[in-house]
Image: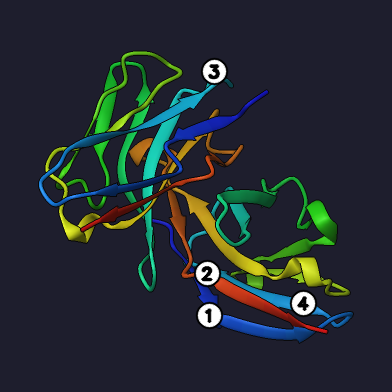
Amino acid sequence: NAGVTQTPKFQVLKTGQSMTLQCAQDMNHEYMSWYRQDPGMGLRLIHYSVGAGITDQGEVPNGYNVSRSTTEDFPLRLLSAAPSQTSVYFCASSYDRSYGYTFGSGTRLTVV
Amino acid sequence: AQSVTQLGSHVSVSEGALVLLRCNYSSSVPPYLFWYVQYPNQGLQLLLKYTSAATLVKGINGFEAEFKKSETSFHLTKPSAHMSDAAEYFCAVPQKAAGNKLTFGGGTRVLVKP
């Protein structure tokens, strides 16, 4: 059972480039989320999904897009990378509010 | 919306000493509360969870937490610290709306001295 798999683990982008952070889970969880973690700012919710075809914005959605075409996958797209998007990104999935979230190992993104 | 506050961004303990990490929730009683641990350069791992079935909750790696309604607290403890406990710990509460999103405390970084 792989849990939540994020790729890549590390990425360096130039300002203005676009890219997609991949997230896949094999636990048949309906709820999936993307967080970013920054020093002094804690973990902040970017986007979330409550099931295939349903997504919504979190606290810091600007500059990011998501889609959820399948239960398993929840990719995060950076449209035009900016240095302010340098961060560690975590994908997480959940079966139910009472179970908590299972987190991936993260993607460390640097935008130069 | 529910919120949690962690007192102390850094805690230093000696190996073998008690570990006590503090978490207080907002005034309304949450049905669920979680403690997560994050080791360096890793994701977050669920340590334990409160689901109102029991006020004393035991988790992995020898940690436990007690839910105290009178103190609006859910403090995390471990009787004897080990070097491998050096990590950052987060208290979190799920929201009823927003896809069960987790609202995290600010985190407490634990340093274990030999």
Disc 2 and disc 3 on one polypeptide chain:
no
Say which element carries label 4.
strand
Marks 1 and 3 close (CB-CB < 8 Å): no
Of mark 2 and mark 4, the one earlier in the sequence is 4
Residue B7 placement (x, y as % from top left) = 55, 80
Would you name the residue on which mark 1 appears?
Answer: B9
Of mark 1 and mark 4, the one earlier in the sequence is 1
**Which sits in the foreground, A53 or A78?**
A78
Three-letter amino acid code of the residue under disc 4: Val
Would you name the residue on which mark 4 appears?
Answer: B19
Three-letter amino acid code of the residue under disc 3: Asn
Q: CA distance from mark 1 to mark 3?
A: 35 Å
Say which element carries label 3.
loop
Q: Is residue A39 above or below residue A101?
A: below
Say which element carries label 1.
loop
Q: In percent of the image, x 68 and y 79: which residue is there?
A: B111
Would you name the residue on which mark 2 appears?
Answer: B107
Q: In percent of the image, x 53 and y 57: which residue is there?
A: B92
Q: Is residue B53 above or below residue B30?
A: above
